[in-house]
Amino acid sequence: MSEQRKKRKTNSLIPVVIFLSLSVLLVLVICFVLSLTLLSTKEGGFFSAKKEKASEYASDEPIPVTYSQAEVDEMLVSARETGASEKETEIKEMIRAEAESKNPSLATILRRMYPEYMVYSGDGTFYFQELDENIPANPYARENFVTQENGYRFYEENGTRKSVLCIDVSSHQGAIDWPQVASSGVGAAMIRAGYRGYGSGKMVEDETALANIAGARANNIETGLYFFSQAVNEAEIDEEVDVLLQMAAEGGVNGPIAIDVEKLDDSSARGNALSKEDRTHLVEYFCEKITAAGYEPMIYGNAYSLFHMLDYSRIYRYKTWYAFYSDFMYFPYQVDSWQYSNTGSVPGIKGNVDLNVRFVP
């Protein structure tokens, strides 16, 4: 082979060598870029470590960060474990704080642990009543209740009083000095009209009812009536309503007329035999008759009677008079009156008297 042919052959290989060299260089560049991208997807990687600094010079577009499914699953498990641990610690601290308080109450602990339920007790058992979002909620903020040195409690919003002090009385209080009661700041009163014997079923009118109605009305105190019911049928409700309406008309009652529903811890209490359905029907029947007579019906009870003895979802449209003796009102729904004490003291009344917050617009 001649020297000229060798030279031409060598020159013909140059483009091939250049092409191969460029190809290798391109592959190296691609690999380098891919390696940097891979590093940026890992916690603690190069771009992750320089992300904050790089953002000072980069555009507004965020630097994409991706995680594998395994990494996401691992983070979720860790988050759940951390959250569960924090919640457990919170609950333990709450229980400890309650246990260290004066006269610790298991009911208070349960109520704080289960805010989605109305927690109440009866028959030696705690009950959990699931809240009904269809019933108007309690709009009263705990911090807006103000208790005076004399034990009178009021509800205030932005410095404006939104309640009056209401008392409920019966023959147990004896003769009452109503002018002194009025001057002490009482704005409303519920007078017991009578009761039905829980064993015999006998109707008994309160011997002080008419005098109390007259005394309260004469001193410009809003006056309502209530009847302690042990009625077991509509005919007995009719009897109780008749007594109430007669007294209301005679005394010029201008407040609500209530049925008092309570459970008696006595095996002979005739009302205890009623089913929840039957008792709810009788209470509705009472309210309908009071409404038809032109008065505002009201239902008195504690959590046990309102939720366990009655179907509250059927009676909430009527005024609720709720009994709960505490420094705060534990009740999920709107109420008209809150009986917060049965050991109150009011000038003009001998002995203890029930005190109530009567909410006003």
Image: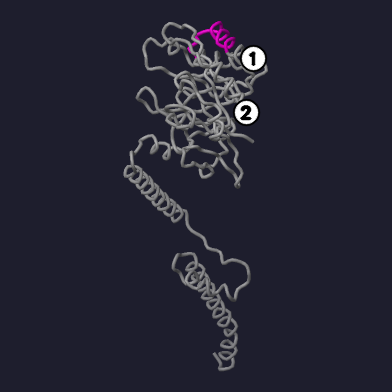
Identify the main secondary structure in magenta. helix
The reply to whether the magenta stretch includes residue 230 is: yes
Marks 1/2 in contact by CB < 8 Å: the verdict is no
Q: Pointer 1: what residue?
A: 249
In this image, 278 relative to 221: left or right? left
**Residue count near mark 1 (Cα–Cα under 10 Å), binned few <14, some 14–19, many ≥20:** few
Dot 1 falls on a residue whose secondary structure is helix
Task: Name the residue nearer the viewer: 54 or 239.
Answer: 239
Task: Name the residue nearer the viewer: 82 or 132.
Answer: 132
What is the x, y in percent for residue 187?
Answer: 58, 32
Q: Which residues are magenta?
A: 229-243
What is the x, y in percent for residue 343?
Answer: 42, 30
Specify the amino acid type for callout 2. Asn
Say which residue appears at 52% left-offset and 23% top-offset. 300
The reply to whether the magenta stretch includes residue 109 is: no
Q: Pointer 2: what residue?
A: 220
